[in-house]
Amino acid sequence: MSAYTVAIVGRPNVGKSTFFNRLLEQRKAIVDDISGVTRDRQYGVSEWNGKTFNVIDTGGFVPDSEDIFETEIRKQVKIAIEEANALIFMVDVVTGITELDDSMAHLLRRSTKPVYLAVNKVDNHERMLDATEFYSLGFDHIFFISSISGSGSGELLDAITEQIEPEESTATEEELALPKFAIIGQPNVGKSSLLNALIGQERTIVSDIAGTTRDTIHTHYNLFQKEFILIDTAGIRRKNKEKDDLEFYSVIRAIKAMDEADVCLLVLDAAKGITAQDVSIFSLAARKGKGVVILVNKWDVMEKSTNTARDYEKVLKQRIAPFTDVPVIFISAKEKTRIFKAIEIGLDVFENKRRKISTSQLNEVMLKAVEAYHAPVVRGHSVKIKYVTQLPTQVPSFAFFTNYPDDIKTPYRNYLENQLRTHFKFQGVPIRIYFRKK
């Protein structure tokens, strides 16, 4: 199941971004916030009532003429309607209903998706009375909120999260499920070429299952005794709309593909190296608890000397630190160099992600590591770790039971993570560590 996505739409200056920031800042579970991927759109993750969902802020335009204004906004709303599971339509009580609100309402009423009308800036009794005119827009779910103070936003979030199904995370389904790989990365790094190289022979494709969104195609791959689902986000660029729309599409699609995948194959362009955008894609995948394999593409055209690959990998790992236990493979999609190795490593990472370590084995190894290097003494207390167990989660997570769980600092947490990685195979997989009171 891919994650639930909520888009905030509305004309400029009604307070969409303020509300978006409120959703993100107040929740500890913000996973990431990639801003500036395109000029005015932002994407983040929010949590409410124990349910997590993606939030998109569709941003306002400040265009030159009124006409462009209308068309640009309408375009954004159409994309949002298509991509999201639910929509928050934001209007402003101070200015009342404008023509732009009317035409947007017209678009939204035709959508089959739930629309929550949020009348913003309702922060006193008088405005509450003014706000009733918005009932005339004809939406069932109407909420009076103030983005700045946060009043009314709880009721709105309650209504949204009620619609979100709890993820069926039963282990049995996971057993049945084939590994899912998403090819992710920036435009023009060679994602399509990689996909075409992998599924080049027609007969290798068992079936084409069209994905949840129109352009993510799930290809069932069965070849050389290897079977998995490839989630392709590579078809994004072929739309002949303006570049700006594509940026929006591609980021949402990539995020949706990431949500559905077990392992993300992050493709980089060898000549460009790892850019800030690549690092943010990488950290988003890691924070979403996905396995990651880094594929450095177009390696065939690089000038090489004895240690080129080794030095390149070293620089790359400095950029993605602290999570550096990630396989890096130098490939050429065009020449088909090492692309099948990439799949083998991807399957290894998938296995690592599902690895369960018995409590006895875990304690035997990890308590020795704790003995070898004790947690630093805090405020005169000596911190003792008595017991370790792996939690039944999708991402490898470990609970260390200790007398002072709050006093263990990051360097020691990193030491424990490194010990887990040294003794057990978790390459390419993020590890979560929790300290609990014994």
Image (tube, rainbow, N blue to C red):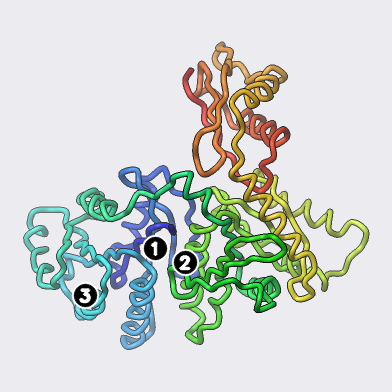
Q: Which of the 4 quarters of the picture holds residue 376?
A: top right
Element class at badge 3: helix
Q: Are marks 2 and 1 in contact (CB under 8 Å)?
A: yes
Can you identify the residue that label 1 sits on? 56
Mark number for residue 252?
A: 2
Question: Disc 3 marks which amino acid?
Answer: Arg
Q: Name the residue at 60% across, 29% down.
A: 358
Element class at badge 2: helix
Q: Which of the 4 quarters of the picture holds residue 17?
A: bottom left
Density class for disc 3 (Cα within 10 Å; few <14, some 14-19, many ≥20) is: some
How many numbered marks are there? 3
Q: Are marks 3 and 1 in contact (CB under 8 Å)?
A: no
Alpha carbon distance from label 2 to label 1:
9 Å
In the foreground, 11 or 175: 175
Tell me if residue 202 comes above or below residue 423 in the rendering: below
Question: How far across and how far down the image is residue 4, in percent?
Answer: 38, 58
Left or right: residue 224 compared with residue 79: right
Q: Name the residue at 27% across, 68% down.
A: 113
Q: Earlier in the sequence, mark 3 or mark 2?
A: 3
Q: Name the residue at 28% across, 70% down.
A: 10
Question: Foreground mark, 2 or 1?
Answer: 2
Density class for disc 1 (Cα within 10 Å; few <14, some 14-19, many ≥20) is: many
Density class for disc 2 (Cα within 10 Å; few <14, some 14-19, many ≥20) is: many
Mark number for residue 109?
A: 3
Question: How far across and how far down the image is residue 272, in percent?
Answer: 72, 68
Question: Foreground mark, 3 or 1?
Answer: 3
Q: Tell me, yes or no, if residue 189 can be seen here.
A: no
Tell me if residue 399 comes above or below residue 145 in the rendering: above
Question: Disc 2 marks which amino acid?
Answer: Ile
Left or right: residue 18 compared with residue 237: left
